[in-house]
Amino acid sequence: MKSMLLALFCALSVNAQNVKSEGTIFVDGIKDKKWNNSNGKDFTKASFAVFSGACYVTLEVDQTAEVNFKSVSTISKGKLEVKLIDEQEYDYFYCKTSKDCIVVKDITLEKGKKYRLYFIGENAKGKFEVNWEINK
């Protein structure tokens, strides 16, 4: 009986893992008049006409977990950088492009650490989307 309860508790604990996201936070305000973005519990995305500057979304996990990230950027003008960093600015993934960039990567996020998904534009026209999911 105890082993069944322990197994049930472990299963519930695994299912309770979450990635908390907040954003989009603009470092110097927004200058792109055609900026459009949305965020959800497992994604962030935006489209833009002339994005210059930087913004980010913060991520935290309630338990240390391996998280699968898929980042897709499509740029028709200018340049865009996408990167995931921690508080010490360690890069977990990075892409700078003037065309298309796809990054798919499993990354262990640690409980108690704050992470930032940064987007830095240089007269960029296009869109990006980053999705994340805890690996079970």
Image: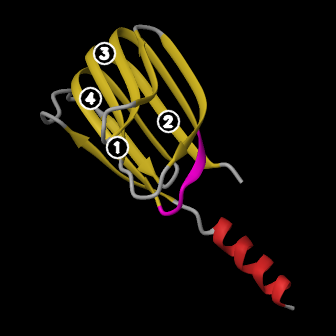
What's under tag 2, amino acid-wise?
Val
Q: In this picture, is 43 found above or below 28?
A: below
For residue 124, the mark is: 3
Q: Which residues are magenta?
A: 62-68
40 w.r.t. 107: above or below: below
Q: Is residue 98 magenta?
A: no
Give the SS element for disc 2. Answer: strand
- Disc 4 target residue: 34
Give the position of the C terminus as an image quadrant.
bottom right
Identify the disc placed on residue 113. none
Number of other residues with Cα within 10 Å of mark 3, as a class: few under 14, some 14 to 19, many 20 or more: many
Q: Quadrant of residue 86?
A: top left
Q: Are marks 2 and 1 in contact (CB under 8 Å)?
A: yes
Alpha carbon separation for disc pair 1 and 3: 19 Å
Q: Residue at x 31, y 33 (%)?
A: 89
Instruction: Give the residue type at disc 4.
Output: Lys
Residue under numbered circle 1: 57
Rounded to the nearest whole Å, what is the CA distance between mark 2 and mark 1?
10 Å
Which residue carries the number 2 mark? Answer: 130
Earlier residue among tags 2 and 1: 1
- Mark 4: few/some/many CA within 10 Å (<14, 14-19, 20+): few
The residues tagged by marks 4 and 1 sit, at their Cα atoms, a distance apart of 19 Å
Q: Is residue 66 above or below residue 29?
A: below
